[in-house]
Structures are given as structure tokens and as C-alpha cells.
Amino acid sequence: MKKPVLVFTFLLFQIFCFAQDHMDDAMAYQYYQQGQFQEASILFEKLYHKTNNETYFELYFSSLLKIKKFEEAEKLVKKTLKQNPKNLVYSIAMGRLLQEKGQSQEANKQYMEALSNLPADEFKIREIATQFYNFQAYDLAITAFLQGRKLLKSNKPFTFELLSIYRYKKDKQMLIQEYLDALPEMPQLLPQAESVFSTIFEDNNDYQLLQTALLKKIQKEPQTEIYTKLLIWQYLQQQEYDMALRQLIAQDKRIKDDGGILYQAANTFLSNQAYPVAIKAYEYLVSKGKENEYYLPAKVELINTRYELLIAGKYEKNSITELAAAYQAILDEYGKTPQTIFALKKWVNLQAYYLNQLDTAEKALEEAVKIPGLTTSDLGQLKLDLGDLYILTKQPWEAILIYEQVAKQFENQAIGNEARYRSARLSFYQGNFAYAKSQADVLKASTSQLIANDALNLSLLISDNLQSPTDSSALKMYADAEMLQFRNLSPQAIVKLDSIDIAFPNNSLADDILMAKSKIWIKSNNISNAIAALKTLSEKHSTSIWADDALFTLGNLYENNLKDPEQAKAVYQKLINEYPGSMYTTEARKRFRKLRGDIIGT
């Protein structure tokens, strides 16, 4: 009858011991993590002697080293080595002890002996390398992995471990090599490789290392497409768009692609304002023939890219008629429908602002708003464009009426606020400053940051320059210049702006005139004049309403037009530091980090 009682008592004792060990384990780890190594060593000693577990040995041994109890640590490791002479973990521990005692030569000898005795066992090799890694002996960990590959007669094992160590050490040469060796077998690593390279690469020299390594690989293994993909990415990162396109076309021909990869790349060129390269890409896609699925999209984007080149001031004027004819061909072939409204709008813009065919453009827009099936947003935008045309054709009342119509139809929406802003801008052109300011003041609370900022600038422009009769007269000339620029009469606008100081010396519009001129020069691709004006504005008028606009625009010119990332970074940094409340600060910070090589979004 007593036997069950004894068994039950024994079970209770076992449960108690298990619970006690669990509590000791948790407490020991807590002490270790908090840096209380003396307390941790007592508990880990108890746990190790009870279990002979390697993990407890490592933590007990490390705790002793932390509190410099070298004699006790030596006794522990010698005893353990005697019991387990073939276990390299304990051999490495002896090396660590020697290293901590300042006996570096003896420690290295111990490490080399351990490495020379590595078994041809992937698990054991990883275990030994991890031992080195845990006490930050990264070069020894690398040696263990590389030696392990020789023993296993394969370069495939330990890829992720080596990539991690090379990345941590910022060993760019070896990181590149490891990725290039791994990618043919693991092409899914390509996005990771691109992300890592963009993070640790600091300048063009780093990208040149990658390019050199890639070209060697491609020469030896021309059939390995993953190398070509990475090379194209590298060219894009360096903004070497012509080289990227050359590789893309070669790849397209080699793999007989449907053009999808090239089409996406062409869109990238376009978004980066590399218009000539984008045009070449779209032309190549069009040359693949009408049966290709990207023929029509490429043809449309080809025309649109030429249009973007035109409005950026980088296109020959004698080709405007040809461009307008290309849009007309789309309208003739597919008709004036909701699907071709994009072509109609651009055709109208060319007629009105570049070919001076105002009546033709006005009639086309008046007909366009009657096209059945238009979305409400397309209809609203067409009416806004028509309002602008009424200004050009000197029908201000018609313009105001249609702006008000759009504003009511799209109350409290972005397009409605845009209509109200255009109405305020028209009042400004007409010299009705008080009314223009009252409208702008209402729009300062717009949910659209861009419209709110434009409205604020207009309101401040008016209030800052109505302090005296001289300023008021100067502001009227400035409004006339803005109207000339609106009509795309840039030379006349520059002349009008220059005449303000002559007619009204010491007026208060110096910063506004500089900003207006810079916009005109940017549009006409006179980048040097634009930069000079923006620099003067930001340096001599640091409290101007245009100061942050000037810096952001200047940074953008350095980044995208002059391809000078260092100057761009300096300007963006100045904007971030001196104008933290600017609407451009977030974008400036994003661009600064991108130029520095950060991964955006982290």
C-alpha cells in the first residue's frame, strides 16, 4: 500500500526539480542579458554541472571571462577538453581564454589547430563558425565557412551566413563576389542583392567594382541572364541610361522577349526625365511591329515623351507641327472618345501655346466637353483647360464663369479648389489684387497641400507688395509679366520683369522677380541662368516666401539636370536644416537619403 505513495512523492520531487531548473535557467539568462555576469556565472555553473549542455558551458565560460575569473575559466575548459578532446567547441574556448589573457600568438595557434581539424560535416562546420561569430571573430568565421566549402567540395553551402558577415563588415569586394557566385543558382536573391548594394555602396567607385565584376562574369558566362539584369540595374543606379538601354535591347534580342522588360525600363527612363533615351526605347518597341502587344502603348508613349521633351524646352521648335500631327493621327484613327482624350488635350495644348492656333484649340475643347462617356474628372479638367484658353483669347468673363462652374461641381475636391485658384490667379493678372487675395486666403486651408501652398504664396505676394503706391504699380507690371508667361511668351515676360526695376527702382519685388525668371529659364532649358537666379534668391533673400521653393528647385536641377549629387545633397541638407516647416522638407529628406545610398522607407 506504501508503494504508490513513494512513487507519487518521487514524481513530486521530479516536478519540483524541473521547476527549479526552469527558474534558474530564466534567471541566469536575465542576469546575463543585463550584464550581471557574476550572478549569471553562479547559476550557469549549477546548470552546466547538472546537464553537461554545450550552451550552458558557453554561457558559463563567457560569464567567467566577462568578470575576468581566468583561473576558474581555465580549469573549466581544461577539464572539459580532457573529457571531450575531439570537440572543437572547447578547443576554440581555450583560444578565447588565451586571447583574453593577452596571449594572442598562442590563441591564434589554438584557432588554427581547430580550423585544421574541421570535419567534412556541414552541421559541425556551421557550429564552429558560429562560435567564432559569437565572439566577433568574423574573419575566423569566414575562414571556417570557406574551409568548410573545400572539405564539402561545394561552393553552395553557407551562402547566407557569408553574405551576412560580408555585409556587416562592409567588405564590398567579397559581398559582390558572393552574390555573383550565388545568383545563377538562386536568382530569387536578385532583389535582395540590389537592396543591399544600394545600402552599402557609397560612391561611383563602389558601383564600378560591381560593374567590373559583372562584365568579367558576363564574358565567361554570356548565357547567364541574371548577370545582365544586375548590370542593367547598375547602369540605372548610375543614371547611365544609354548603357542600360544598349544592354536591354541586346537582352531583348537574345532571349526573344515580347518587349515587356524594355517597356518597363522605357517608363523608368521617362520618369527620370531621360527623354532622348526613352524615345529610343519606345522607337525600338514600335519597330517590333504592329503584331507586338506593346506596339500601341509604345507608340503612344513615344509621342507623349516627345511632348514632355517639348514642354521641358529640350525639343526643336520646327518639330512641334510634326508632334501635333502625331496626336492628330491618333484622333483620326481612333476618333474622339474617352479613351483618346489624353491625345486631344495634348494636341490642344500644342495648338494653343506653341502654334498660336487659339481659335482652333478653343473650338476643339468646346466640342470635347460634349464627348459622351467622359468621366467627371476628365470633364472637369477639360473645362479648366477651356477656361485657360478663354484667358488667352481675351474672354476673362467666360473664363471666370467656367472656373466657377467647375468649383461648384467639385466643391471641396482638389479639382474644385484648383478652379478657385485659377479664378484668383486671373483676378491677379487683371490687377484686381484685393479680390485675388480674398480668394487665395480661403484656399490656404485647402486639403491639397500644393494648392494651399500656391494660394499662400499668392496671398503673401500681394500683401507684401502693396505697402506703397510704387510697390502697387510694380506689382501690376509683375502681374503683366506673369500673364505673358502664362501665354508662353517667355522672351516678352523676361523683358517685362527686367523693366520693373527700371520703372520703379527700390521696389519690394526683387525675390519674386528672381523666382519668376528662374521658372522661365528652366522651361527654356537655360539651366545656368536659372541656377544663378536661385542661388541669389536663397542667399540674399533667406526670409522670402520663395526661399524654400528656390532651394528645392536648385537641388532638383543639380540632381537631375547637372547630375551633381554632391551639390544636390548639400542644397537638400540646407533646406532640411533651415526650413523644417516647408512643404518640400519631406521630399528633400527622401531625395537626400536616396543620393546618400539609403534604402528609402527604412
Image: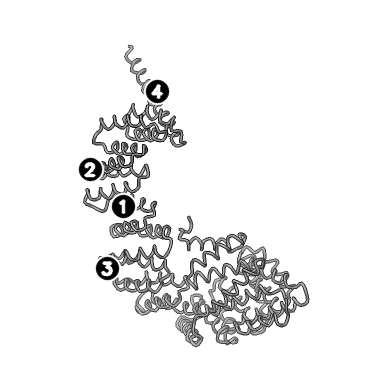
Q: Badge 4: how crowded within 10 Å, few (<14), some, or many (20+)?
A: few
Question: Mark 4 or mark 1, which has the lower sequence index?
Answer: 4
Q: Using the image, tell me which numbered label, if any, was put on residue 219.
A: 3
User: x and y percent of residue 455 in the render?
Assistant: 66, 68
- Comparing labels 4 and 2, the label whose residue is closer to the camera: 2
Question: Mark 4 or mark 3, which has the lower sequence index?
Answer: 4
Cα–Cα span, label 1 and label 3: 24 Å
User: x and y percent of residue 552 in the render?
Assistant: 57, 67
| Residue at x 62% of width, y 60% of height | 581
Helix, strand or loop for disc 3 = helix
User: x and y percent of residue 215 in the render?
Assistant: 31, 67
Mark 2 — residue?
Answer: 119
Mark 4 — residue?
Answer: 16
> How many numbered marks are there?
4
Question: Mark 4 or mark 2, which has the lower sequence index?
Answer: 4
In the rendered structure, the answer to whether residue 127 lies left or right of residue 22 reads left
Amino acid bearing label 2: Pro
Cα–Cα span, label 3 and label 2: 36 Å
Question: Mark 2 or mark 1, which has the lower sequence index?
Answer: 2
Amino acid bearing label 3: Gln
Helix, strand or loop for disc 1 = helix
Amino acid bearing label 1: Thr
Cα–Cα span, label 2 and label 1: 19 Å
In the rendered structure, the answer to whether residue 568 lies left or right of residue 257 reads right
Mark 1 — residue?
Answer: 159
User: x and y percent of residue 368 in the render?
Assistant: 56, 80
Cα–Cα span, label 4 and label 1: 45 Å
Q: Badge 3: how crowded within 10 Å, few (<14), some, or many (20+)?
A: few
Helix, strand or loop for disc 4 = helix
State yes or no: discs 4 and 1 in contact (Cβ < 8 Å): no
Cα–Cα span, label 4 and label 3: 68 Å
| Residue at x 48% of width, y 63% of height | 595
